Structure formats: C-alpha cells, structure tokens
Amino acid sequence: MELDTLYKTYRPFLFSIAYRMLGSVTDAEDIVHDLFLQLKLDTDEIKDMKAYLAKITTNRCLNYLKSARKRREVYTGPWLPEPRVNETDQPLDKVVTDETVAYAFLVLLEQLSPVERAVFVLREAFTYSYEDIAEMLEKNKVNCRKIYSRAKRKLQNYRPVHPEDTKHVDLLAKKIHKSICDRKL
C-alpha cells in the first residue's frame, strides 16, 4: 500500500487516538504528520496495518507526554483540553466528529497518567482487547487489566478542582435565574 493511500485511509483514526490522548488538536496533528513523514514500511511483513499504526501513534503520544519539553510547559491553572472545531461537512469528517470524546471526558482524562490514559482510551474508545493493548504497550495482559481498573476508579472518584466555589456559583446562578424570570414577567 502506498504512503499516500495509507495517509488518506488512516489519518482520521490515528488523529482521533492522538487527540484523545493529548487533548490538543495541534499536538495530535503534529504526531500524526510526523508519523507519516518518518514512516518507512515493508507492508508485506505487517499483518494488521491499522493495529500497527495505532501502536506507533500511541507510543509517540506516550513519549510526548513523558518528554522533558512537555513537563516544562506547565500551566498553573486547571487544564482544559482545547475543543475540536470541524468546519467541513465531509462524510468521513462527520464520522470522526461523531466518534470524538465529549469535552468533559477529556477533562477527566487529565486525571490519569499517560499509561493509564493510553490503556483507558484504547479499551473504552476503540474496544481493543487486553491482549492487544498489552502488546502495544509492551506490558502483560494482567497488568493492563489492573491499569484499566485503577484508571476507571480514578475517574469515578473525580472531584471538581475548586469545590469550595460551589456555594458562590450556586448563589450567582440563582440570581441570574431570578433576573431572567423577572424580565419575562
């Protein structure tokens, strides 16, 4: 298979993996573009091209998340992933857009370590088996199951970053609601 055909076929899938792991459109695009720029394949030796490219993308995202450059770019406030805006109405883009994870889910994923995020996204979003995930991340199947269960538990126990502000926010919301209702009368 030619590189151009591979790019057109798998770019949306690989972008969705990278975006879910990194939470940034530009970083996800960079990962996918760099992957194809540096890709040198002997396609006869690869049994499952989609799984192979997914593994490469996942590993590149993990490397990026662990990199010194990423650690130096520390924002002191709460991390929010950039929302993905898609201007085209292409059928393939619509499928990818429909498949993307909700904004709140991306915020929750920030609570996970890079490896937990990779296991969770590959299992939940792409329904890979634990055997496939273990092979991609070079871990064993039991370890991947445990990482997944810990990640799920972390997400279930998630608390907002600033819970002390809720009284003020509730009071403000009531005032706004009251003023809107008063205008209607």
Image (cartoon, rainbow, N blue to C red):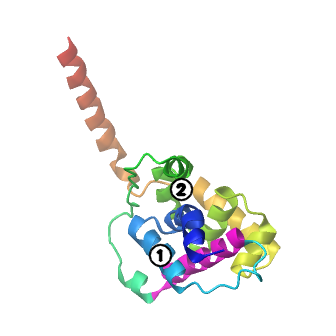
Helix or strand or loop: what does disc 2 sit on?
Answer: loop
How far apart are the two marked residues, 1 and 2, measured between alpha carbons?
34 Å
72 left or right of 129 in image: left
Quadrant position of residue 80: bottom left
Q: What residue lies at 46% left-to-right and 58% top-to-bottom? A: 107
The residue under the point 72% across, 57% down is 127
Q: Is residue 179 magenta?
A: no
- Judging depth in this view, the residue of 87 and 137 nearest the camera is 87
Where residue 12 sits, quadrant-wise, is bottom right
Residue located 20% across and 11% down the image: 185
Give whichever of discs 1 and 2 has the lower sequence position.
1
Q: Amino acid at mark 1?
A: His
Residue 71 figure quarter? bottom left
Closest to the observer: 4 or 170?
Answer: 4
Q: Nearer the viewer, mark 1 or mark 2?
A: 1
Q: Position of residue 168 (x, y in %)?
A: 29, 43
Q: Nearer the viewer, residue 128 or 166?
A: 128
Residue 9 in the image: above or below residue 163 = below
Q: Is residue 56 magenta?
A: yes
Magenta: main secondary structure: helix
Q: Secondary structure at mark 1?
A: helix
Q: Quadrant of the N terminus?
A: bottom right
Find disc 1 in the rendering and name its residue: 33
Say the numbered circle drawn on residue 158.
2
Q: Amino acid at mark 2?
A: Tyr
Mark 2 is surrounded, within 10 Å at the Cα level, by few (under 14), some (14 to 19) or many (20 or more) other residues, namely few
Q: Residues within 10 Å of mark 1 (few under 14, many from 20)?
A: some
Instruction: Judge left or right: residue 105 versus residue 151.
Output: left
Against 97, is 16 above or below? below
Residue extent of the magenta highlight = 49-67
